[in-house]
Image (spheres, rainbow, N blue to C red):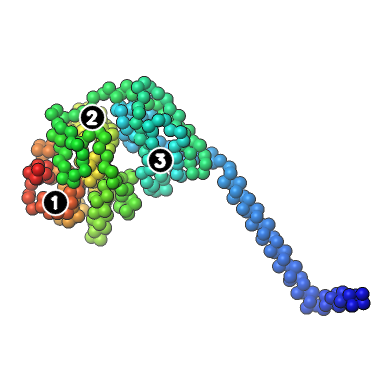
Amino acid sequence: MKTRKFLISNTLNIFKSRASRILAFCIIFLVLVFVGLVIILALAEDKVKSVQLTPATSADLRLVSKRWWPAEVGFRDTSLELSFTETQLSVSSNIEIDLVNPPTGWKLQKIGNEGGRYYYVILVTNVPTRVTEYVIKFLDSRGNLIYREVIINPQGALVALPSWADSKYLSSGDDLLVQVNREFKLPQDYVPQDLLILSDLGIRTWFPTQLRQEAALELQKMTQAIQAAGLDYLITSGYRSFADQLRIYNEKVSAFGSTDVADRISSRPGYSEHQLGTTIDIVTSENGYSTGAFELTRLSNWLKEHAHEYGFVMSYNSQSGEASGFIYEPWHYRYIGGASAAEFIKSGLTLDAWLKARK
Ligand SMILES: [Zn+2]
């Protein structure tokens, strides 16, 4: 008992000295700071959790503008129509999305992301036989459900596809040296199987653009060489689906009021080298990214001199004219492989004539 009393009074005595009191306050202060931090962190974590649990009011999801639409697929408040039996819808979103219980035969396919947006296409097969309204449900990566209404009007499917008389369908476009012209066309469902997104390879594109792997990798080297030469470039077109080409052609026909003009500046669907996934349109800032007067730019000269070193050749040169049905297009290059490109350049022929002679 005595010993215990002695210990207590001794401990109290320690606090009587000034230094000991300061030490005690410091310890208590540090303990309080620690407890305070723990409480603040716990609250902060709770706040983050509650933000995640609150549904965002808008996921900023939209079906992209009409120019992106392959044919005529419309929202409730538009009068656009679907004009053939197999097509796709383009979608872009600021966060990743998925389709929830899509209509049978519809598939969401991610194309890539660029400028902070994710780009997708919805492949629409199994098109209805009468005007049908769909509610498409998207689920974004934050867990929000987003609804969009789409009307598909298959009546437009009765419109005949603009074809060239006596042309034959190719079985595939996989061969790098396949001839695509008014005589030979690509089938509606030909889609190259090894498409890559060019921006993923650091290639500058106007819109998300794809090319077949071999062509894309060579284009990557070529564009690096263009930049090393102190020039700039922009790829404005690459792979184009049959559906895209039909839309573009129809736009030209309605803009110029006749197929005559449209046929000189655009291809009918199936007749475009862009469907091969090996062909690009390339422009430069020097003339305002225009195809007009492109041939006067330094990039045009560089390409004439060097593109074949990377397997790219100009499809429609100044001698092409009526033979291919195309005007001179110095911005339109097709990948045929390095060895073939070297042979072709030596021949002095137009690409169409050279490909024909090779058969
Ligand atoms: Zn082109």
Residue 74, picture quadrant: top left
Residue 340 is labelled as: 1
The amino acid sitting under disc 1 is Ser
Q: Position of residue 16 (x, y in %)?
A: 84, 76
Spatial distance from mark 1 to mark 2, Cα to Cα?
35 Å
Q: Nearer the viewer, mark 1 or mark 2?
A: 1
Q: Position of residue 118 (x, y in %)?
A: 41, 44
Judge by depth and name the residue closer to the eye, 127 or 314. Answer: 127
Q: Residues within 10 Å of mark 3 (few under 14, many from 20)?
A: many
Residue 253 is labelled as: 2
Residue furthest front in the image: 1
- Is any part of residue 339 visible from this angle? yes
Judge by depth and name the residue closer to the eye, 91 or 304. Answer: 91
Instruction: State which quarter of the image contains the C terminus.
Output: top left
Find numbered disc 1 in the image and state the secondary structure of the residue it sits on: helix
Q: Residues within 10 Å of mark 2 (few under 14, many from 20)?
A: some
State which tag comes first along the sequence, 2 or 3. 3
Left or right of residue 56: residue 156: left
- Is any part of residue 80 visible from this angle? no
Residues at marks 3 and 1 touching, judged by CB atoms closer than 8 Å: no
Residue 25, picture quadrant: bottom right
State which tag comes first along the sequence, 1 or 2. 2
Residue 1, picture quadrant: bottom right
Q: Is residue 193 above or below residue 20?
A: above
Q: Nearer the viewer, mark 2 or mark 3?
A: 3
Name the residue beneath numbered marker 3. Answer: 92
